[in-house]
Amino acid sequence: MNLSVCRRAYTLIELLVVISIISVLIALLLPAVQSAREAARRAGCANNLRQLGLAMHNYHAAVGSFPVGFLYPTGPIPTTTSVLQYRWSTLAQMAPQLEQTSLYNALNFDFPLAYRPSGGGSAFWPFYPTNTTAMRTHVAIFVCPSDGAPAPADDSGPTNYVFCTGDGSNGGEATGANGAFVLGPARSVAHCTDGTSGTAAVSEQLLGIAGPYTQTFASPAPQPTTRAFARAAAGPLTEAACEASAPGWLLNKGASWWDGNYLNTLYNHRSPPNAPRPDCVTYHNPGWKAARSLHPGGVNLLFCDGHMAFIKNTVDSNIWRGIASCAGGEIVSSDGY
């Protein structure tokens, strides 16, 4: 007897329908997964800033002021270096309050960052040997998880966090600026007559696209320009000088946590967060540098009282500049940001 067996199977159309449904579900799921991951990264970044806020106030309690944006030397300067090579950053000054005491002890602020090579002729001065090991140290709390930029060369430690010098209205000079972290005498809570809850302290920057001392003079501009500096000629910053970028483009943004300059640990509020216009600097100071991040829609900002806020890219320019100054007399409502 011959028995025929009837076997059921999926048709090609049914299989294609199932594949299409799965593809749609994956397409719907991936953005949600990516959003959840970015939310976690943004929270991690905010936590880093809160740790900086605690350290900032512990430093204030111990010293009586906030750290300066640029640690000027108090003694004589050797002929083999210059005053600009003693620009120890706010992060370096606060290292003990950030549970980096061993790192702080490895730094000797009596010595410069770099020195002039014998015979001259070098475009960049080498690091001073006494501090080289500490300067090469990568500190996890100084890096935002959302950035994703490759770490710079081994001779430097990067940072995504920058301290506010003010609103940039004085031509980008950090010396005598109107913010809480300037090149000059240290400022305290008493100097913040606008209120510490309404004065910006620390925000974010994107790391550069090359190592600490790498730069290019190629044209056109490097991409993305948000990770580079247009380098203007020495002297007062002007729109024309920044747009021309005659000496070239600097690609080492945020490469050195210990370096107290606009390239690495300072910024101002002349431009809104994540401004499309490239940042511009002469080299160390002055500079026009916006807060920047890869968080969708804005940047994290730590205020001088230690509270955090997420500032949108669309923040009103008057409010953004108003919260940059310590004693400008602006009346700023938190509803504005």
Image (cartoon, rainbow, N blue to C red):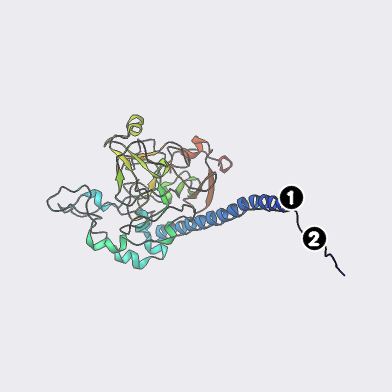
Answer with left or right where residue 324 lies relative to residue 90: right
Where is the N terminus found, in terms of image quarters? Answer: bottom right
Task: Quadrant for residue 268, please give it.
Answer: top left
Residue with the most extreme left position: 119
**Residue flagged by tag 1: what amino acid is it?**
Ile
Answer with left or right where residue 43 lies relative to residue 100: right
Local crowd at mark 2 within 10 Å, few (<14), some, or many (≥20)?
few
Indicate which disc residue 13 carries.
Answer: 1
On the image, the x and y values in percent for residue 52 come to 45, 57
State the SS at label 2: loop
On the image, the x and y values in percent for residue 321 come to 46, 38
Indicate which disc residue 8 carries.
Answer: 2
**Residue flagged by tag 2: what amino acid is it?**
Arg
Query: Nearest the camera: 29 or 123?
Result: 29
Check the image and report above or below for 64 versus 220: below
Local crowd at mark 1 within 10 Å, few (<14), some, or many (≥20)?
few
On the image, the x and y values in percent for residue 264 come to 36, 49
Where is the C terminus found, in terms of image quarters? Answer: top right
Query: Nearest the camera: 321 or 148?
Result: 148
Task: Quadrant for residue 230, please give it.
Answer: top left
